[in-house]
Amino acid sequence: MGRPDFPATIIEFQRRFPDEQACREYLFESRWPDGIVCPRCGSGSATVLPRRLLWQCRSCRYQVSVTAGSVLHRTRTPLHLWFWAAYLVTTATPGISSTQLQRQLGLTRYETAWMMLHKLRRGMVNPERAPLTGQVEVDECYVGGHEAGLRGGRQHGAKALVVVAVEVRGTRAGRVRMRVVDDSSADTLCGFVTDCVATGATVRTDGWPAYRRLATLGYGHQPRSQRAHQLAGEDTDEILPHVHRVISNLKTWLQGTHRGVSKEHLQVYLDEYTFRFNRRRTPMAGFQTLLGLSSRIEPTTYAEITADGPRTAPQTAESTG
Ligand SMILES: [Zn+2]
């Protein structure tokens, strides 16, 4: 028996997860696709203690939580609501707001919807995700703030600086990575590349000198000078077409769907964009990942989330997820 797959349609979803029992069984199969083995005595026989989402070993009575390390750990919200929330978040394009989620799930409290969305967003970062390979375009952009006074150049202002890497697969974009950075120095930009791109890859950038170090870090570096292209009479947008398209779509998404995002929350939204972009052909595949069922993600505490504070019910447009 392998890991259970994900439902492909809303009808199938409804059939598969009608109640808490079905959700519990799915959690169990996701966590222990080959059956449970007691970590203490090695026994393969366990009984469920449903109320606490624990499985207890029949031999030594050791208790294992099926939700440890997932967003569901110690939740008091019914599992089937979590499953629906993850379904809605992964399949709604381009996202869903706390208000929409509250309405769809019939939640009494706005704060519950807000908390669920934020926990699910944490599931959008997979710490073990594989580095980009092959041909990769890298560029930076400014996001948010006001446009005035920051045209061109790489000086820092009210806007956040974001560096973006995009895999090039033939004529199409592959996977993306994005990070909010403090500056456009060689340490920062090349550090991003070494974190996100496998050595041996070919990295295309513009002519910014900070990228020159890439050639010494195990990459095939292809700097493309805007000036050289201008002199040759070529369209400078075509220097790095894939990363420029991703940046343009990102800005539209942040502005259109989220009505702009503050600098301190930006990375969370970049992660969500990345999550959706990298699963754009199979959005339902993200369902298990969001619930923390396919990778080991540290559970998010209330304190971590509310460092910025849950907003009370919005007066105007709310940031969506
Ligand atoms: Zn045991």
Image (spheres, grey):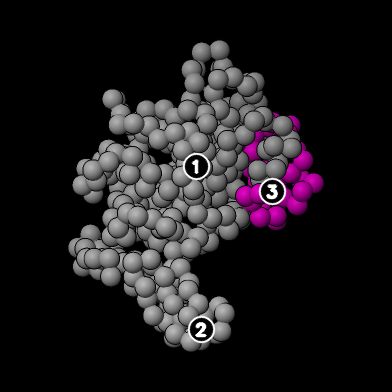
Against 128, is 166 above or below? above
Which percent across, then down, holds residue 95? 34, 43
In the image, is residue 200 part of the stretch drawn in magenta? yes
Question: Of the residues under marks 2 and 1, which one precedes in the sequence?
Answer: 2
Against 46, is 245 above or below? above
User: How many residues crowd around disc 1 within 10 Å: few (fewer than 14), some, or many (20 or more)?
Assistant: few
**C-beta proximity under 8 Å, tags 1 and 3:** no
Please name the residue shown 54% across and 23% down the image: 159
Q: CA distance from mark 3 to mark 2?
A: 47 Å
**C-beta proximity under 8 Å, tags 3 and 2:** no
Question: Of the residues under marks 1 and 3, which one precedes in the sequence?
Answer: 3
Please name the residue shown 70% across and 43% down the image: 191
Mark 3 or mark 2, whichever is nearer to me: 2
Amino acid bearing label 3: Thr
| Secondary element at tag 3 | helix
Residue at image mark 1: 303
Stretch of the chain drawn in magenta:
194-222
Q: CA distance from mark 1 to mark 3?
A: 31 Å
Residue at image mark 2: 60
Residue at image mark 3: 194
Residue 4 visible somewhere in the drawing: no
Q: Taking 295 as reference, is 5 left or right?
A: left
Q: Which one is nearer the viewer's eye here, 302 or 122?
A: 302
Which percent across, then down, holds residue 59? 48, 87
Amino acid bearing label 2: Cys
Any atom of ligand 1 within 8 Å of the CB at mark 2? yes
Q: Which one is nearer the viewer's eye here, 100 or 192?
A: 100
In the image, is residue 231 part of the stretch drawn in magenta? no
Amino acid bearing label 1: Ala
Residue at the extreme front of the image, as rendered: 61
